[in-house]
Amino acid sequence: MSRILRITLFKIPDAAHVQEAIAKYSTLTNDAKKDGKPYITSAAASPTHDDARNQGYTLVARTTFESKADMDYYDNECEAHGAIKAGLKGKLVDGPPLVVYVDA
């Protein structure tokens, strides 16, 4: 199995909401648990630079998982990820975030 690097791009128009999301991602490796243990290898988020090439994306989140199964758990069962989703509800524009993942 290879590690998974996941990049998630968000369109969050309010800079204060971007900072809230960054704060949530900064504690994700400790907050996210699977079978009672942390399972995310690394997690971080940062705002994009103000540039037309961003196409409206204002936040980039990077998460690394030991396996695709761990990423699937993150998407479907992780309470910490659920809290991030709930915190961003109603704050995004143009639909859901763009998610891309590759072997790390």
Image (cartoon, grey):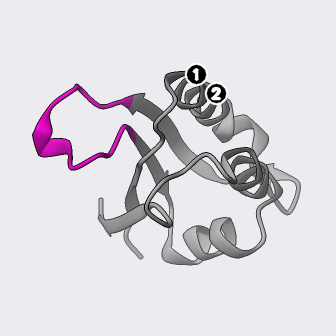
Residue 88 appears in the picture as rendered: yes
The amino acid beneath tag 1 is: Ala
Picture residue at 50% right of the left edge, 66% below the top: 96
In the displayed image of the protein, which residue is found farthest to the left?
53
State yes or no: residue 82 in magenta: no
Q: Quadrant of the C terminus?
A: bottom left
Asked if residue 92 lies left or right of residue 73, the reply is left
Would you name the residue on which mark 1 appears? Answer: 16
Picture residue at 74% right of the left edge, 48% below the top: 32
| Number of marks drawn | 2
Of residues 12 and 46, the one nearer the viewer is: 12
Q: Are marks 2 and 1 in contact (CB under 8 Å)?
A: yes
Residue 54 got which mark?
Answer: none
Asked if residue 96 lies left or right of residue 39, the reply is left
The stretch in magenta equals 47-59
Examine the residues drawn in magenta and state their main secondary structure.
loop
- Picture coordinates of residue 63 (x, y %)? 47, 49
Of residues 89 and 33, the one nearer the viewer is: 89
